[in-house]
Image: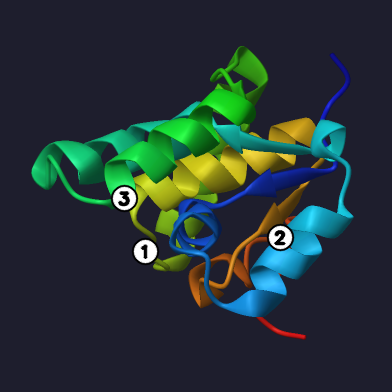
Amino acid sequence: MTAPRYLLDTNIVSYLVKQAPAPVGHRFDAVPRSSIAISVVSEAELLYGLARNPGTKACAHVHDFLAKTVILPWTSEAAAQYADLRATRERSGKSIHILDLLIAAHALALGATLVTNDQVFRDIPGLICEDWTRN
């Protein structure tokens, strides 16, 4: 499999599962599925959300989304990106949630654009981000 063009952050998947806001769904539908993937880290976050709230309406939607989406495993390349990124951020005094750091490192290792509306990713050197929640 070739690397995806887009790696969806967990918050974008949440928008898709909830079917809101409209710009996310329109953009998602306009991109070939072969160009989209999520990190196994996002899968873990989604499954954790379901484990915290079992039996919610979102459960079936999340499982359906995961069944239809390429989920990329953590790799040694992603681990190397993570190590460099975390060390750089610690030296600069800029904190970021560890799971967000793992997702950013995964996108960097893949050379993929991270689709997110979380502003915390905006100052990560070399990381290209797109916000599909905006027109």
Q: Give the mark toward the camera: 1 or 3.
A: 3
**Element type at mark 1:** loop
Rendered residue at 37%/64% (across/down): 95
Figure quadrant of the N terminus: top right
Residue 27 point in image, percent of width and height: 79, 65
Q: In this view, does 51 lie to the left or right of 130?
A: left
Q: Which amino acid does label 2 sit on?
A: Pro
Q: Mark 2 points at which residue?
A: 125
Q: How far apart are marks 2 and 3 (CA)?
A: 34 Å
Q: Give the mark toward the camera: 2 or 3.
A: 3
Q: Name the residue under label 3.
A: 58
Q: Is residue 89 above or below residue 111?
A: below
Q: Residues within 10 Å of mark 1 (few under 14, many from 20)?
A: few
**Element type at mark 3:** helix
Q: Which amino acid does label 1 sit on?
A: Ser
Rendered residue at 39%/60% (across/down): 96
Dots 2 and 3: beta carbons under 8 Å? no
Q: Mark 1 points at which residue?
A: 95
Residue 61 point in image, percent of width and height: 42, 44
Residue 92 point in image, percent of width and height: 48, 65
Dots 1 and 2: beta carbons under 8 Å? no
Rendered residue at 41%/32% (across/down): 63
Q: How crowded is mark 3: few (under 14 residues within 10 Å), some or many (20 or more)?
A: some
Q: Is residue 20 above or below residue 7?
A: below
Q: Is residue 45 visible?
A: no
Give the numbered dot on residue 63: none
Q: Which of 88 and 121 is in front in this view?
A: 121
